[in-house]
Image (cartoon, grey):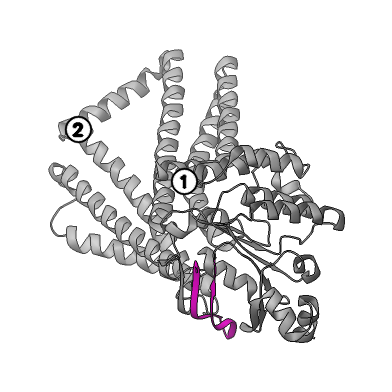
Amino acid sequence: MVMLKLMKYEFRKQAFSKMVILLLVGLIELLFFFGIITDKSDVMGTAMGILTIFTFGALFFLAFESIITFSNDLKQKSSYMLFLTPHTSYSIVGAKVLAAAIQITLAGVAFFLVYSLDIAVLVGKYNQLEALKEIINHFLQEVFSLNIQFKDIAAVVAVIITSWISTITVAFFSITLSATFLANVKLKGLVSFLIFIALNYVFGRIVNMSLGKVYDVNNFNNLMMYYSLISLFMLCFTIITYIGTSWMLDKKVSV
Amino acid sequence: MILQCRDLVKKYYSKTAVNGISFDIDQGKIYALLGPNGSGKTTFMKIAAGLVKPTSGTITYKGNEIGPVTKKRIAYMSTEPFFYNYMTVADVGKYYNDFFEDFDVKRYEELIDRMELNMKDKSKTLSSGLAAKLKIAATLARKAELYMLDEPLNGIDIIARDKIITTILEAAKEDVTLLISSHLVDELEKIIDNAIFVKNGNIALMGEAEDLRVKHGKSIVELYKEIYA
């Protein structure tokens, strides 16, 4: 319940950007459907191109915004609003991590649905897209003949999400470090950024050294196990950096 | 006593904001924390509110370390505006109601009305005077055991000051303690039970207001001028 209230305000703080993203996706879709109605393939192509670039940009922005919000909550006066509430730093950081995870997952699902809609409309409208359907069907057959199943795809999606969340918590950890143990260091922002890069590199190395020799990524029989283990590693890194961040906030941070 | 601090130190870089102070705050009294800007008043209050961690020393509220338990009982109002930019006056009330069990919504509405604020106003568009009134309304709508108000009269015009002081005094009940910091000493002189003079992070003088007046043969305002001149 406590976490839900904290999460509610995390969502509220970042609501404006979501509305802007939604509005821009709406405009791109309008352009796309204008192309459909007027049979202008160049308009459709342009809309899909913009949507593709926008998807990557928006997903990166969402992660970045979670990190910026955390940074602001340590550096701006509005941080009092958060840190005066009678909650432990573990609840506060936990709410931020969960809110970030939910936002990224929901955004991913939303973009998937938009693409699905666009492709369904294209396939439905144009018979010449039969070729595209065949390519997709062929691809799926290839995939399934290699014994790649939905659970494998789910494992890959899990890796993407857990890696993303791990990156965010590593950023939280680095920012908190710069506000505590590095508070008296010159260029602490740069130092914390270097720590962020270094930690991500070290975590990447740990995964590669642990799993690289055990599983051959080209051996598709091991795909699900391989990606599940990566997710497990990412989850561990998330927990470690979450606990480290919360501990520093509890013991050291002054806002 | 309810708030107890011993050898409390807070250093920022090479600057010492609070320099080993020790004192107790008793229940049911109004304390003035006096001193010019930079004397360490705000840092002390932030430590007691749990926003700043001391470099060394201890501070407890009713035997509890400062943390979630004490934050439920202590209402702190900072001197700076601190509400989220997106918030309206109504949003501030909802936020406090969501997080503080002792928040009284009806009291908040009453105070907002008294302060001539509008529930629909955005906090970031308020003038400094209205923003100060909003902080006071949100803080005093809590039924806390200890209120710590940092410069509550800052930005308040001379006409509205009496209204603010009356509102503050309404919170002062038998079991409620108020710690008010201000450099507007003459405004506080008439309402305080105790005075703590802070100078360069140290306690320069402290005691019951009446005892200080009798002992030194001076008013609190005169003592202030003598200590900080």
> Residue at left 52%, top 35%?
A51
Placement of the C terminus of chain A among the 4 image quadrants: bottom right
Q: Nearer the viewer, residue B65 or B50?
A: B65
Q: Nearer the viewer, residue B85 or A116?
A: B85
**Camera sees residue A155:** yes
Judged from the image, the secondary structure of the residue bearing numbered disc 2 is loop
Q: Is residue A219 left or right of residue A239?
A: left
> Residue at left 67%, top 68%?
B193
Q: Is residue A253 left or right of residue B156?
A: left
**Camera sees residue B54:** no
Does B55 appear above or below A255?
A: below
Graded by Cα atoms within 10 Å as few (under 14), some (14 to 19) or many (20 or more), the crowding at tag 1 reads: many
Graded by Cα atoms within 10 Å as few (under 14), some (14 to 19) or many (20 or more), the crowding at tag 2 reads: some
Residue A131 spot, x, y in % from top left: 36, 21
Residue A7 spot, x, y in % from top left: 45, 44
Q: Which residue is mark 2?
A: A149
Asked which quadrant contains residue A203, the reply is bottom left
Does A69 appear above or below A175?
A: above
Q: Which residue is mark 1?
A: A6
Distance, label 1 to label 2, CA atoms, is 38 Å
Residues drawn in magenta: B1-26
Q: Chain ID for label 2?
A: A
Name the residue type under label 1. Answer: Leu
Look at the image and say whether residue B15 sits in the magenta stretch.
yes
Placement of the N terminus of chain A among the 4 image quadrants: top left
Asked which quadrant contains residue B68, the reply is bottom left
Q: Chain ID for label 1?
A: A
Is label 1 on the same chain as label 2? Answer: yes
Earlier residue among tags 1 and 2: 1
Judged from the image, the secondary structure of the residue bearing numbered disc 1 is helix
> Residue at left 32%, top 48%?
A162
Q: Which secondary structure dominates the residues rendered in magenta? A: strand
